[in-house]
Amino acid sequence: MTSRVVARNGLLCPIVGFASCVAFIYLSFGDVRLNFYVGKKMDFVARNGTQFVVDGKVFYVNGWNSYWLMDQAVDEYSRPRVRTMLQAGARMGLTVCRTWAFNDNTYHALQISPGQFDERVFQALDHVIAEANQYGIRLLLSLVNNLQAFGGKTQYVKWAWEEGIGLSSSNDSFFYDPSIRQYYKNFVKTVLTRKNTITGIEYRDDPTIFGWELMNEPRCMTDPAGNTLQDWLEEMSTFVRSIDKKHLLTVGLEGFYGPKSPKSLTVNPADWAALYGSDFIRNSNLPNIDFASAHIYPDHWFHELEFEESVKFVSKWVRSHIDDGDRELKRPVMFTEFGYSNQNPNFHPSQRDRFFKTIFDEIYASARKNGAGAGSFVWQFLVGGMEEYNDDFGIVPWQRPSTYQLITEHSCRLAALRGLNQLKGSLRELCLQGK
């Protein structure tokens, strides 16, 4: 018996010693994964009147949409697409990518049910943010969808209805049902206070994030006067600001003018646009909203419009909203989605290039005058092999040399307004070629 005890103790000592050593290393150095990640230093983007600034210098956005980044980062086989896209964006001189920070109860759902999250998907979003930092790309993160894709407000209403606490089955009850408002607040708080498992930084403290978007294309058609949506925006923008005072915040509007706005008759694409319960001026003119946003889809807004007329409308639409930023809102304005459909009759890629150039030229003209035109985001960029994520607007930019050149030239002319000597990394390398 004694010999067995001695043998057992002899084996126990090295095991205890090894375990103690591991515990000491962990307590001393923390999560080993964090030690291998070295992030790039980035400063927060701030607002100074109608302009964005970084470290006291004006910052313009030539950006793009890849809504699918978190989704593709979940599985190992598709994760390299995230790096490919962000790396390509950096090479094109792009500065901000707009993407979804939500997925409610669909495939690869981030939020499985109210307040319940899939950690694997959250870690995918961690990966997206960490990768973006490595390439000097900032992220504009949208927090929920007005549309049904990826769950959206429809899923929130369904959750409340299934729990027996919903006031109505109407999708618009998302905006006025107290229980659903609390669902949204709980989701927002969880995201903003999330500690990235790769970088060790809470999202609200990470300058890689350009800003937050309350909702993608909010509409409340049951209240065309707009009071319901306005009340929701006031409450949620105040709530976000109470948690995160470092990042910029926007609504996520399409840019339509409400029924009380004179521009509803002169700038809106048609009468229906004033009946969606939103108003570009009123919704954007809240104390906690840092910049206004608008989208540009004339080929979806008009049933039959010749290309030349479409281009004229785009110029008028962009100028009108920039003018609002300069005169009324005193805030930057960004066109956070714009695209030209390949389903248009007699479509040719050169038309899309001209459509893009029209928007880029208006942004640049404003920027040269220190105006409110602060940037734009193409909808949408993909990498090869992603047909299921494509729509009639998506492009793989490096497969279209003329489009690629147009976008990179716009990156450099916006950068030149800051002074080429201020450029760093991929943007400096791109814009100094041939100088």
Image: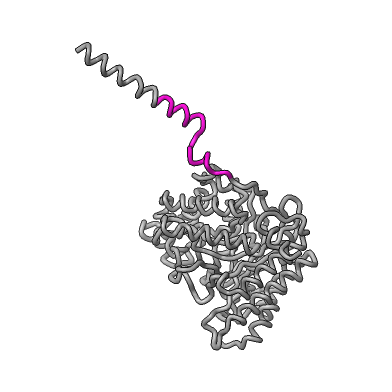
Residue 176 in sight from this viewpoint: no
Residue 330: where, in percent of width, then height?
74, 62
Quadrant placement of the N terminus: top left
Residue at position x 48%, y 68% in the image: 384
Asked whether the viewer can see residue 363, the reply is yes
Position of the C terminus, as image quadrant, is bottom right
Residue 285 position within the rendered picture, expressed as x and y whole percent measured from the top left = 68, 62
Kindly give the residue lying farthest to the front in the view shown. Answer: 434
Residue at position x 70%, y 78% in the image: 315
Nearer to me, 134 or 64: 134
Residue 353 occupies which quadrant of the picture? Answer: bottom right
Nearest the eye: 332 or 428: 428
Start-end of magenta stretch: 19-38
Q: Residue 65 is drawn in which quadrant? A: bottom right
Above-or-below relation of 357 to 84: below
Magenta span has 30?
A: yes
Magenta stretch, main secondary structure, is: helix
Residue 369: percent from left, percent from top:
80, 67
Residue 341 on the magenta span = no
> Does residue 367 appear left or right of residue 214 in this picture?
right
Up/down of 78 relative to 263, above or below: above
Vertical position of residue 332 compared to residue 274: above or below? above
